[in-house]
Image (cartoon, rainbow, N blue to C red):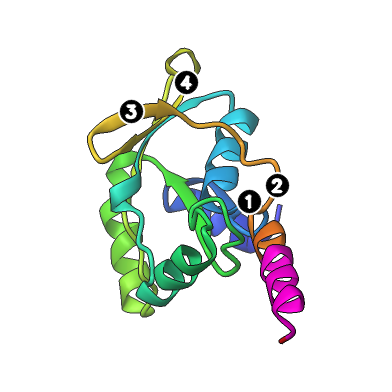
């Protein structure tokens, strides 16, 4: 165990996972499965940069299933959350509470616009099919 790992655990962090492949949805799903837990997630609480939202809308990509390089998902004990958010903010790192870890039997649920659904792993990052389709459109139009 490294000094960094000991430090974050002492400060209440229970898990960390990047959201690179298959984005936030993939990362949350993988954390829940690896920790044998469920999750209750509020999609509307997940920060989304306006430029990323526009780009994903342009290509018909779910921004929460797409590669989210640079995004770190952290789980922590409830009592530790305010201090973790304060530490991140002090470093200029945007962070938000997007849900809670629940019992495995409750499943992995996402609430979107007031409607709840089961979260499935995206399996494939939507960037590549979207970019391939764009390239085919350009090729067909002679660009």
Secondary element at tag 3: strand
Q: Position of residue 117 (x, y in %)?
A: 40, 27
Of residues 55 and 66, which is closer to you in this image? Answer: 55
- Give yes or no for residue 44 being in the magenta stretch: no
Of residues 108 and 117, which is closer to you in this image? Answer: 117
- Give yes or no for residue 134 being in the magenta stretch: yes
Q: Which residue is mark 2?
A: 124
Of label 2 and label 1, which has the lower sequence position? 1
Q: Are marks 1 and 3 in contact (CB under 8 Å)?
A: no
Q: Which residue is mark 4?
A: 107
Q: Which residue is mark 3?
A: 116
Q: Are marks 2 and 1 in contact (CB under 8 Å)?
A: yes
> What secondary structure is the stretch in magenta mostly built from?
helix
Disc 1 versus disc 4: distance between alpha carbons?
A: 19 Å
Which circle, 3 or 4, is nearer the viewer? 3
Which circle, 1 or 4, is nearer the viewer? 1
Disc 1 versus disc 3: distance between alpha carbons?
A: 20 Å
Q: Which residue is mark 1?
A: 22
Of label 4 and label 2, which has the lower sequence position? 4
Disc 3 versus disc 4: distance between alpha carbons?
A: 11 Å
Disc 3 versus disc 2: distance between alpha carbons?
A: 22 Å
Span highlighted in magenta in the image:
131-142
Disc 2 versus disc 1: distance between alpha carbons?
A: 6 Å
Q: Is residue 142 above or below residue 133?
A: below
Q: Quadrant of the C terminus?
A: bottom right
Secondary element at tag 4: loop
Secondary element at tag 2: loop
């Amino acid at each position: 165990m490294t000094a960094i790992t000991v430090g974050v655990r002492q400060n209440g962090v229970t898990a960390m996972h990047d959201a690179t492949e298959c984005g936030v949805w993939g990362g949350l799903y993988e954390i829940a499965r690896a920790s044998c837990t469920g999750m209750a997630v509020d999609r509307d609480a997940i920060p989304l940069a306006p430029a990323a939202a526009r780009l994903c809308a342009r290509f018909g990509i779910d921004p929460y299933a797409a590669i989210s390089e640079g995004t770190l998902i952290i789980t922590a004990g409830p009592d530790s959350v305010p201090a973790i958010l304060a530490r991140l903010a002090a470093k200029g790192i945007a962070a938000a509470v997007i849900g809670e870890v629940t019992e495995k039997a409750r499943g992995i649920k996402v609430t979107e616009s007031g409607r709840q659904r089961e979260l499935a792993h995206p399996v494939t990052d939507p960037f590549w099919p979207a970019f391939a389709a764009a390239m085919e459109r350009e090729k067909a139009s002679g660009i």
